[in-house]
Image (spheres, rainbow, N blue to C red):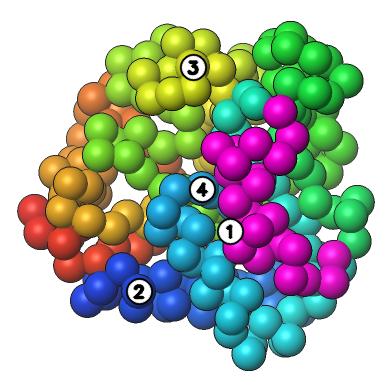
């Protein structure tokens, strides 16, 4: 663990999404000013989708040079390209389709209709190799912001409580089988990949998330609550609405 850990509360899911969108735009602009490009890892889920839609709707999005933003995903459902269950499809619909992007900087996770077909492990290795190209000597880039949603069970990316994938850190990306949440096959960053991020933002909304938020903020048992084990090198933000913060 390194860097500061902060909890930021917002009164409603809508304000949470809007505020997170504003933070993201500012962080990207700052990264581009400092380093020329920004590396951002996106997430899915309801609040993740609302956040991306809020970015698309924000006038401040014009302050970002979107051709110099590298987009990644911390996990993805191993399904065909364009499947509505994929996080990348959600991101395309909510934000990416509205931006003037350089296609070479949008790093979509592998799909079952990709070059590796339904070979999950080969697909995960392919994504790990792509991350390595931008790692500057490390396995993955030092993400300027790595966004994570969190399930009511405390899972982040596709790292689920007491799942064998929790203990696998031999690569930056793993193939996940037997996910307790459908679909069963996924690709996911490992804890090691997440730990390279300058800032990790955990975004949670809703009363059903409150117990897991409390365990995660307290840095409890990672096997029980994987969100308790993710930190950024500079900063870790828990961005929550009042319902999700109820047990803090």
Mark 2 closeness class: few <14, some 14–19, many ≥20 residues within 10 Å:
some
- Measured as percent of width and height from the top left, residue 49 is found at 50, 58
Q: Which residue is mark 4?
A: 44
Check residue 145 in the rendering and tell me which mark sits there, or answer none. Answer: 1
Q: Does 64 appear above or below 116?
A: below
- Distance of mark 2 from mark 3, alpha carbons? 30 Å
Q: Which residue is mark 3?
A: 184
Q: Residue at x 74, y 9 (%)?
A: 119
Is 127 in front, or is 186? 186
Mark 4 burial class by Cα count in 10 Å: few <14, some 14-19, many 20+ = many
Magenta run includes residue 88: yes
Whichever of callouts 3 and 4 sits on the residue coming sooner in the sequence is 4
Q: CA distance from mark 2 to mark 1?
A: 21 Å
Q: Residue furthest left?
A: 247
- Quadrant location, the N terminus: top left
Can residue 136 be seen here?
A: no
């Amino acid at each position: 663990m390194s860097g500061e850990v902060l909890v930021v509360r917002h009164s409603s899911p809508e304000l949470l999404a809007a505020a997170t969108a504003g933070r993201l735009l500012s962080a990207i602009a700052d990264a581009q000013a400092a380093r020329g490009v920004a590396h951002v890892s996106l997430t899915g889920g309801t609040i993740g989708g609302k956040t991306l839609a809020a970015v698309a709707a924000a006038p401040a999005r014009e302050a970002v040079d979107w051709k110099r933003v590298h987009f990644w995903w911390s996990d993805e459902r191993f399904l065909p390209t364009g499947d509505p269950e994929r996080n990348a499809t959600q991101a395309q619909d909510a934000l990416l389709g509205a931006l003037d992007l350089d296609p070479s900087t949008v790093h979509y996770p592998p799909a079952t209709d990709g070059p590796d077909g339904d070979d999950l492990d080969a697909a995960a290795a392919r994504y790990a190799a792509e991350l390595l190209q931008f790692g500057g000597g490390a396995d993955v880039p030092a993400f300027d912001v790595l966004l994570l949603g969190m399930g009511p069970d405390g899972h982040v990316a596709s790292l689920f409580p007491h799942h064998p994938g929790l203990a696998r850190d031999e690569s930056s990306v793993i193939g996940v089988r037997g996910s307790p949440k459908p679909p069963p096959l996924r690709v996911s960053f490992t804890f090691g990949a997440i730990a390279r991020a300058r800032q990790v933002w955990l975004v949670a909304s809703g009363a059903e998330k409150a117990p897991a938020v409390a365990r995660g903020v307290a840095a409890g048992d990672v096997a029980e609550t994987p969100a308790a084990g993710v930190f950024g090198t500079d900063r870790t933000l828990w961005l929550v609405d009042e319902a999700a913060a109820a047990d803090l």
